[in-house]
C-alpha cells in the first residue's frame, strides 16, 4: 500500500458532507493537506476545527478558471507540488426535463464538468512534471446509470466519466492514476435542497464514503483502483 504520510493532497469540496469526514482521516494519516471549498466562512470554521494553518486553505468557485489558477498558485507555494487531487465539489439537481430551465442545466454542467476540467488540467500540469500522481473524482452511480428527473445531473456525471476515461488513455505511459468513485446515495447536505423523498437513514453514511476515498488514496504501488462502486444495501441501482 502507498503510505499517506507526507503526501501532498489537495481536497476540493472539503466543506461538503464527505469532505468533512475525509480531511481529518487524511490529516491523521500524516498527509500534507491543502483544503478548498466554495463557502469562505465554512472553510475558515473547519480550518480552526482541524487545526490547519490558514495558509493551507483557499476558497474557490470551481466554475471560475482564474480562481482555480489562484488556488493552484497557493498549492504550489505551500505544498511545492501535488501528489493527489481529490475533487469532491459538485451540485445536484432533480427536475423533470419539461421543468428544467436552461440556466439550471448550465449551472450543473459548469460546476460538475467544467469545474472538474479546470481542476484536472491544473493538477496534471503539476503531476506531469513529476510523472506521477493520483486524480480522484466522484461521478457517483448517476455517472453510470440513468434516473428519472436527473437529466442535468446525469449529463454532467456521464461527461465526467467520459472525460476522465479519455484522459486515462492519454496517461498510460506515466505513473499518473485516475480513480473514479461511484457512490449511490450518501447521507450528506447534498440532499438538503433536492426535490426527492429519500430515507436518509438508509443511505451510505458520509463517514463510510470518506473512508472509501481514504482507502483509494492508498492503493498499491503496482496497481490502480480504476473504479469503486458502493451503493446503499437497500437501494441498489446496478
Ligand atoms: N451525497 C451523495 O449522495 C452523492 C452520491 C454520489 C456522488 N456524490 C458526489 O460526491 C461529491 C461530494 O458530495 P457531498 O455529498 O459531499 O456533497 P455536499 O455535502 O453537497 O458538498 C458539495 C461540495 O461541493 C462544493 N461546491 C459546490 N459548488 C461549488 C463550486 N461552484 N465551486 C467549488 N465548490 C463547490 C461545496 O462547497 P460549499 O459547501 O463550500 O458550498 C461542498 O464542499 C459531489 O461531487 C457529488 O456530486 C454525492
Image (cartoon, rainbow, N blue to C red):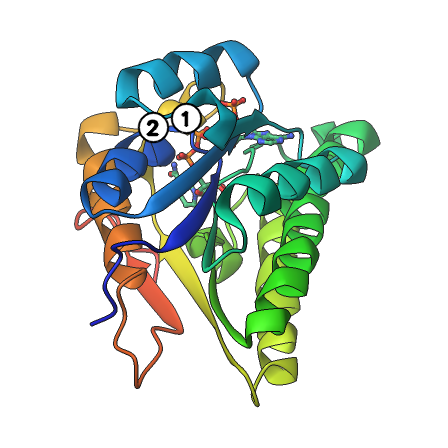
User: Vertical placement of 16 versus 112: above or below?
Assistant: above
Q: Classify 10 Å Cα crowding around label 2: few (below 14), some (14-19), many (20 and above).
A: some
Q: Which residue is mark 1?
A: 191
Q: Residue 56: which disc?
A: none
The answer to whether the residue labelled 1 contacts the one labelled 2, judged by CB atoms less than 8 Å apart, is yes
SS at badge 1: helix
Horizontally, residue 104 falls left or right of residue 10, namely right
Q: Residue 30: in sight, yes or no?
A: yes
Quadrant of image for the C terminus: bottom left
Q: Position of residue 60 (x, y in %)?
A: 63, 29
Report the number of discs: 2
SS at badge 2: loop
Q: Position of residue 181 (x, y in %)?
A: 39, 58
Residue in front for this viewpoint, 20 or 70: 70
Q: Position of residue 122 (x, y in %)?
A: 68, 54
Q: Classify 10 Å Cα crowding around label 1: few (below 14), some (14-19), many (20 and above).
A: some
Residue 42, by quadrant, is top left
Q: CA distance from mark 1 to mark 2?
A: 6 Å
Q: Residue 188: which disc?
A: 2
Residue in front for this viewpoint, 101 or 187: 187
* Residue drawn at 31 percent across, 52 percent down: 213
* Residue drawn at 32 percent across, 29 percent down: 20
Look at the numbered disc 1 and say if its residue's Cβ is closer than 8 Å to ligand 1. yes
Look at the numbered disc 2 and say if its residue's Cβ is closer than 8 Å to ligand 1. yes
Q: Residue 205: in sight, yes or no?
A: no
* Residue drawn at 48 percent across, 68 percent down: 133
Residue 104, by quadrant, is top right
Amino acid at each position: 500500500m502507498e503510505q499517506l504520510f507526507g503526501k501532498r493532497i489537495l481536497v476540493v469540496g472539503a466543506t461538503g458532507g464527505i469532505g468533512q469526514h475525509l480531511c481529518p482521516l487524511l490529516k491523521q494519516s500524516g498527509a500534507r493537506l491543502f483544503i478548498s471549498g466554495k463557502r469562505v466562512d465554512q472553510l475558515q470554521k473547519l480550518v480552526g476545527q482541524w487545526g490547519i494553518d490558514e495558509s493551507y486553505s483557499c476558497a474557490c468557485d470551481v466554475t471560475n478558471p482564474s480562481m482555480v489558477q489562484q488556488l493552484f498558485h497557493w498549492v504550489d507555494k505551500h505544498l511545492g507540488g501535488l501528489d493527489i487531487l481529490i475533487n469532491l465539489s459538485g451540485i445536484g439537481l432533480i427536475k423533470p426535463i419539461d421543468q428544467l430551465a436552461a440556466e439550471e442545466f448550465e449551472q450543473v454542467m459548469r460546476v460538475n464538468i467544467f469545474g472538474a476540467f479546470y481542476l484536472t488540467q491544473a493538477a496534471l500540469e503539476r503531476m506531469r512534471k513529476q510523472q506521477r500522481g493520483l486524480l480522484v473524482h466522484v461521478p457517483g452511480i448517476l455517472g453510470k446509470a440513468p434516473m428519472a428527473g436527473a437529466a442535468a445531473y446525469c449529463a454532467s456525471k456521464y461527461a465526467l466519466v467520459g472525460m476522465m476515461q479519455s484522459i486515462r488513455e492519454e496517461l498510460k505511459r506515466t505513473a499518473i492514476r485516475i480513480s473514479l468513485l461511484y457512490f449511490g446515495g450518501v447521507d450528506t447536505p447534498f440532499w438538503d435542497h433536492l426535490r426527492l423523498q429519500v430515507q436518509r437513514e438508509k443511505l451510505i453514511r458520509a463517514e463510510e464514503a470518506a473512508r472509501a476515498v481514504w482507502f483509494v488514496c492508498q492503493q498499491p504501488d503496482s496497481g490502480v483502483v480504476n473504479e469503486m462502486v458502493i451503493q446503499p444495501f437497500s437501494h441498489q441501482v446496478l
